Image (cartoon, helix red, strand yellow):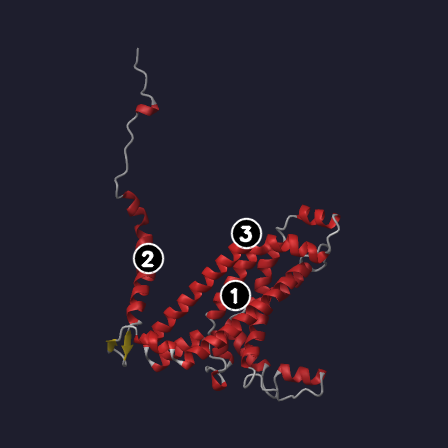
Amino acid sequence: MSAAPPSPSRRSVRAFPAWAPWAFIAPFLVVFCTFVIWPLISSLVLAMQRTYGPGYTRFVGLENFAFLLKDPAFWKAVRNTVVFAAGSVFIQLPLSLGLALLLNRPGLRGRSIYRLAIFSPSLVGLVFVGILFRLVFETRTGLANTLLHELFPAFDPEFPWLQTYVMPSLILAALWLYAGFNMVYFLAALQNVPKDLLEAASIDGASPWQRFRHVTLPAIMPVAGFVVLLSTIGSFQLFELPWILLDNSAGPDDRGLTIVMYLYQTGFITGDLGYASAVGWVLALMLMGIAVFQRLFLSRAEEL
């Protein structure tokens, strides 16, 4: 009579060696250390050096950061960037939410066409948008001045958009570019709002504003927080749009100077890569602070 095969619990199981998990994650660690950790360490070391032309640097410690805190050009770039970010958050995002609410109405005909028309500007590049709006805001022949003068004859056809009103021009260009992009996020969030809660609120006699305030808004708050953070970070990284719109400059009296543009001018035009690296690190710390503040604010709002 043949012997019964051993039970599965008694079968010998060949264990993997202790180094096997490290072999699996080694490619990720190599790529992460090469393209993330090493550049961060190198940029921090570079931020403590002063560059005098190619191939010659001198260690200065925290002098770059001390000079940056007293640099009026840096603070002007910060002020301009904050103004642009405020325009993105308080003008662009409410408009995107309003468009999403309009396109989310049941029974709306041609909804797909409207969505495509509003979203399509975000498919073009920033360079194209910069060139396009440079032509739109031309003093004499620009579309903006020509159209406004036709509608309102008292309007000055030589209105200096890109000479005096640089930040409003940038905000309008970004509004045209990104309003449809952010609308898609809000539209996806609105389609996930529980319909039974809206119907129950309507039956209880809640007005449209009350339904939006107490049902829709809490439901889309996580997506709204993400969109606000995304818009804020993108605003603080603004470079291509003003650089192209203002013809490779910061505009008259540096009215279009942003933090990243100042970093570029300092590092690649002036040639002081150490100071530019310090500007980059301060920008990174500012973005980290904004992200932490927003996270705490949203957590507090969810508790309330």
Name the residue tied to disc 2: 31
Q: Say whether residue 81 is visible.
A: yes
Residue at 29% over, 47% down: 22
Q: What amino acid type should be assigned to the residue bearing mark 2?
A: Val
The residue beneath circle 1 is: 231
Task: Name the residue rendered at 26%, 41% in the picture.
Answer: 18
- What is the distance, in whole Å, between disc 3 and disc 2 at their CAs? 40 Å
Q: Is residue 144 left or right of residue 152?
A: left
Q: Amino acid at mark 3?
A: Glu
Q: Tell me if residue 223 comes above or below residue 200 in the rendering.
A: below
Could you give the CA–CA distance between mark 3 and mark 1, rounded to whole angstroms? 24 Å
Q: Residue tagged by mark 3?
A: 303
Residue shown at 49% from the left, 57% from the top: 296
Task: Locate residue 81, reporting x and y percent.
Answer: 49, 74
Give residue 20's position: percent from left, percent from top: 28, 43
Say whether residue 94 is left or right of residue 254: right
Q: Quadrant of residue 147?
A: bottom right
Secondary structure of the residue carrying tag 3 is: helix
Expressed as whole percent of the image width and height from the top left, the position of residue 298 reads: 52, 57
Q: Look at label 1 and name its amino acid.
A: Ser
